[in-house]
Amino acid sequence: MNNLKKTLLPVLALILVVVLVWALRPGPLWVSAAAVTEGPFVETVQEEGRTRLRNSYNVSVPINGFLRRVELEPGEVVAAGDTLFVIEPAPAPALDARSREQARETLAAAGARLRAAEALLEQARSEVELADTEYQRHQQLFARGSVSQASVDRLRAELNRARAQQGSAIAGAEAARYEVENARAVLAVTEGTRSEGELLSVKAPVSGTILRRHRCCEGVIAAGTPVLEIGDLAELEVQVDLLSMDAVRVTPGMRVVLERWGGEGELTGQVRRVEPAGFTRVSALGVDEQRVPVLVEITTPRDAWGSLGDGYRVEAKFVLWEHDAVVQVPVSALFRQGNQWWVYLIDQDRARLRQVTPGRRSGLTVQILDGLAPGEIVITHPGDQIAEGVRVQVD
């Protein structure tokens, strides 16, 4: 019995030690992982942009005057040569009561002089008719030898004098009529009334859509004041202000994908021009950024984006590089040690350190030029506890 106890006790102690070691050993670390894949890869630069018209026309007032009410509204379509708005001569300012009364009296006096001149003109016409009748009768008598040549010459002179007086009366009536018109114009000035002069109709320079109406109500307007803006919505393009470090990689003709523009699907476009000059813009974080305007031509047929207008927001994705078969992993799987890039693979539930050579990056995915093969599993977001040979378990 004692020998049995002596044999069993060491065995039990050994089993207990093994159980304790097994129970107290560290468990596997829970990690997130992703598979190394091979497939299409597109390197892009994405930035918010806005639509704009390549050519727009601000129609302004050519002269000082009085603008009549502008009936056209934004969204209406006009053809080249259509009347956009009408300008009439500016109304004269009103003066004090005494000036108005003096103007009325002047007009009345001018009217009286006109009537007197017209009466003199009628008298002169009657005298011309009488002198002409006497001259014609004496001509006939002279032909029969009943009167002398002297009588005929005297009547001719009286006829010429009567005609001269008639011409003077006509000139006097014309002068009196001009005085009346002048007095009437002065009275209109003193009363502040709008003149009925010649109207100026401003025509549309091109066919297009009314984009903006800067002025709608009638009133006095100065030369050069913009009234309407016209443009052809078929000429819409997109302006994207890229960071200068991204703009240097963009070239004319590069393919662009337009997303989140408000309609169904995506629109396609191509870079028309990269502006040669940039500008400084303060970001939302208060950092000065150098931006470069990039103009994108929309190549999708107009019917697909007919609801887009000037100044609308879109998101533009510039396709810098693309390939159909590229080995790629999430960016979160890479970390740097020294001058090299590394990843942790999962091999038989163990973390294995491997050096890789990354290539291009697109969003949250990076191209792997060397070091990984499709189908291998890499740990994403490796923490400080991950090391070579550590047991891991995928969460």
Image (cartoon, rainbow, N blue to C red):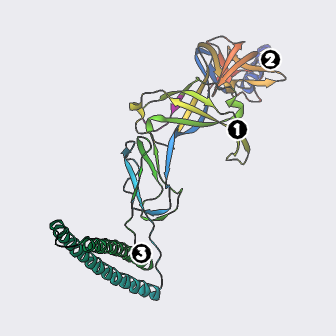
Which quadrant: the N terminus?
top right
Q: Secondary structure at mark 3?
A: helix
In this rendered view, identify the residue nearer to me: 362 or 375: 362
Q: Is residue 307 left or right of residue 221?
A: left
**Farthest-out residue, right:** 338
Q: CA distance from mark 1 to mark 2?
A: 84 Å
Q: CA distance from mark 2 to mark 3?
A: 138 Å
Q: Residues within 10 Å of mark 1 (few under 14, many from 20)?
A: some
Q: Secondary structure at mark 2?
A: helix
Which of the two discs, 2 and 3, labels the residue nearer the N terminus? 2
> Dot 3 corresponds to which residue?
182
Q: Quadrant of residue 9?
A: top right
Residue kind at label 3, given as amino acid type:
Asn
> Dot 2 corresponds to which residue?
10
Q: Quadrant of residue 43?
A: top right
Residue 24's mark? Answer: none
In this rendered view, identify the residue nearer to me: 358 or 142: 142
Residue kind at label 1, given as amino acid type:
Gly
**Would you say residue 108 is visible in this rendering?**
yes
Q: Examine the structure image and report whether residue 262 is included in the region drawn in magenta.
A: yes
Residue kind at label 2, given as amino acid type:
Pro
Dots 3, 1 in contact, CB < 8 A: no
> Dot 1 corresponds to which residue?
278
Bounds of the magenta span?
257-263
Q: Examine the structure image and report whether residue 70 is included in the region drawn in magenta.
A: no
Q: Secondary structure at mark 1?
A: loop
Which of the two discs, 3 and 1, labels the residue nearer the N terminus? 3
Q: Residues within 10 Å of mark 3 (few under 14, many from 20)?
A: some
